[in-house]
C-alpha cells in the first residue's frame, strides 16, 4: 500500500473526489483509488497534532479533513482530520481533501470466536476478550445511567495480567465496524456494549493546547476516537498479542505530463512596398513653326520606313 507523498491542497465533494481519482489514473496509468477509513488511519501519528502525521515522511500535508471511501450510517462518509487525528463523518455535500492510495484493498477482519470467550482476528494476529471488563460481575440494564463498570486507568492496568493489556487506539479502532451504530461493533462477534461507552486505550494524546496527561478513547456507540484526560474513567476491552501496524510507503505525487502550449509560427515582417515612381513627363519649352513641325514629322516617317526595311 502506497500513498501520495504530497496530497493536492484543494478540497472535493465525494463525487468530485471520484473524478479526481479517475483523472489521476488516466494521467499516471496507475490504479490509484480512495482509501477506506482503516487504511487512511495508518497515516496518523497519534502522538502529534497540527499535523497529526509524521512530517519527516509527509512534509507538506494540508491541515483538515480527508475523505475515505467508507460510508457512515446516514449517507455520508468517514474522514480523518490531519489537525487532530480524530475520525468523524461528513455529509456527501461537504468538501474535504483527498489522499490517494495504490495497492489492492485488503479484507479488514477474519474473526474466529474461541471456546474461552475470546476472539482472534487472523488479519492482525490480535486476540480480544469478547466482553468488556465488568468488575460488578454483570452488565446491568441501567448501566448507561449508573456507569458501574467504568474503571480508572489504574484499575484497568491492574487487570492486565497473563499477557492481557490495554489496546492502542489504532488497535481498538481496528475492530470498529463503521457501518454500525450503537454499538459500532459486530455484535455476532463481540457481546453488547453499554450505551454511551467510551473505551480506554494505552495511547498518549495531546489536546489542542498540547497538554500532556491525555489519552485516546474510542466510542463504542459511533466508533470515533478522541483525546481525554488521563484521570477519567472509562470502559475497558483487553487485548493480547502484537499485531503489526502497517506503515504506508510514501511515493512521490504523480505529476501529469503537461500538454505543451502551441507556439504560433512567427510571421516574417515584410518590408513596406514602395511604389516605383512614375517619371513626370517633361514638357518642352521649345516652340516649332508649322513648316518646321511638318519637316520634322517627315524625317520621323522616313526613319521609321528605313528601320522597317532593315527588319
Image (cartoon, rainbow, N blue to C red):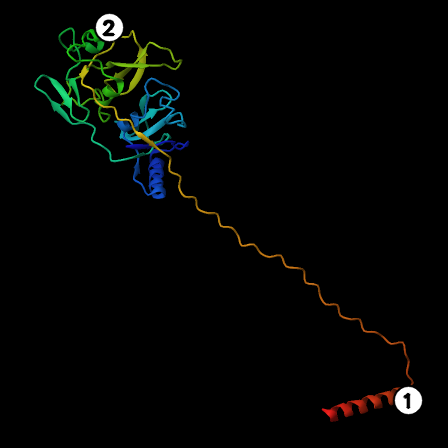
Q: For the view shown, which residue lies furthest in the bottom direction?
A: 309
Residue 271 pos. (x, y %): 66, 59
Callout 1 touching callout 2 (CB < 8 Å): no
Q: Is mark 2 on a helix, strand or loop?
A: helix
Of residue 117 and residue 224, the one placed in the foreground of this image is 117
Residue 162 pos. (x, y %): 15, 11
Number of numbered discs present?
2
Q: In this view, does 109 lie to the left or right of 115?
A: right
Q: Which residue bears the numbered disc 2?
A: 154
* Quarter of the figure that contains the C terminus: bottom right
* Quarter of the figure that contains the N terminus: top left
Residue at left 32%, top 19%? 46
Q: Image quarter for residue 98?
A: top left
Residue 140 pos. (x, y %): 15, 10
Q: Can residue 14 be seen in this view?
A: yes
Q: In this view, does 134 lie to the left or right of 300?
A: left
Q: Which residue bears the numbered disc 1?
A: 291
Of residue 191 and residue 122, the one placed in the foreground of this image is 122
Amino acid at each position: 500500500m502506497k500513498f501520495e507523498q504530497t496530497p493536492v491542497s484543494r478540497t472535493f465533494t465525494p463525487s468530485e473526489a471520484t473524478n479526481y481519482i479517475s483523472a489521476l489514473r488516466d494521467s499516471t496509468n496507475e490504479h490509484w483509488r480512495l482509501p477506506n477509513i482503516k487504511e487512511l488511519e495508518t497515516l496518523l501519528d497519534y502522538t502529534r497534532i497540527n499535523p497529526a502525521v509524521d512530517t519527516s515522511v509527509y512534509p507538506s500535508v494540508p491541515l483538515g479533513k480527508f475523505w475515505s471511501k467508507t460510508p457512515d450510517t446516514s449517507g455520508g462518509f468517514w474522514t480523518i482530520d490531519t489537525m487532530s487525528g480524530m475520525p468523524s463523518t461528513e455529509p456527501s455535500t461537504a468538501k474535504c481533501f483527498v489522499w490517494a492510495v495504490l495497492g489492492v484493498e485488503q479484507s479488514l477482519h477474519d474473526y474466529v470466536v474461541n471456546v474461552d470467550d475470546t476472539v482472534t482476528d487472523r488479519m492482525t494476529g490480535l486476540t480480544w476478550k469478547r466482553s468488556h471488563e465488568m468488575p460488578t460481575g454483570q452488565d446491568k440494564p441501567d448501566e448507561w445511567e449508573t456507569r458501574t463498570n467504568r474503571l480508572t486507568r489504574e484499575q484497568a492496568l491492574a487487570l492486565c495480567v497473563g499477557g492481557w493489556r490495554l489496546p492502542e487506539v489504532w488497535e481498538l479502532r481496528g475492530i470498529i465496524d463503521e457501518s454500525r451504530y450503537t454499538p459500532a461493533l459486530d455484535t455476532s462477534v463481540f457481546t453488547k456494549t453499554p450505551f454511551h461507552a467510551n473505551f480506554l486505550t494505552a495511547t498518549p494524546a495531546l489536546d489542542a493546547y498540547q497538554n500532556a496527561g491525555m489519552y485516546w478513547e474510542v466510542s463504542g456507540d459511533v466508533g470515533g476516537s478522541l483525546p481525554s484526560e488521563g484521570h477519567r474513567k472509562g470502559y475497558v476491552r483487553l487485548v493480547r498479542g502484537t499485531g503489526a501496524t502497517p506503515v504506508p510507503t510514501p511515493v512521490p505525487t504523480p505529476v501529469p505530463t503537461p500538454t505543451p502550449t502551441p507556439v504560433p509560427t512567427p510571421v516574417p515582417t515584410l518590408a513596406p512596398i514602395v511604389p516605383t515612381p512614375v517619371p513626370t513627363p517633361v514638357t518642352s519649352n521649345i516652340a516649332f513653326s508649322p513648316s518646321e513641325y511638318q519637316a520634322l514629322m517627315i524625317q520621323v516617317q522616313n526613319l521609321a520606313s528605313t528601320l522597317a526595311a532593315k527588319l
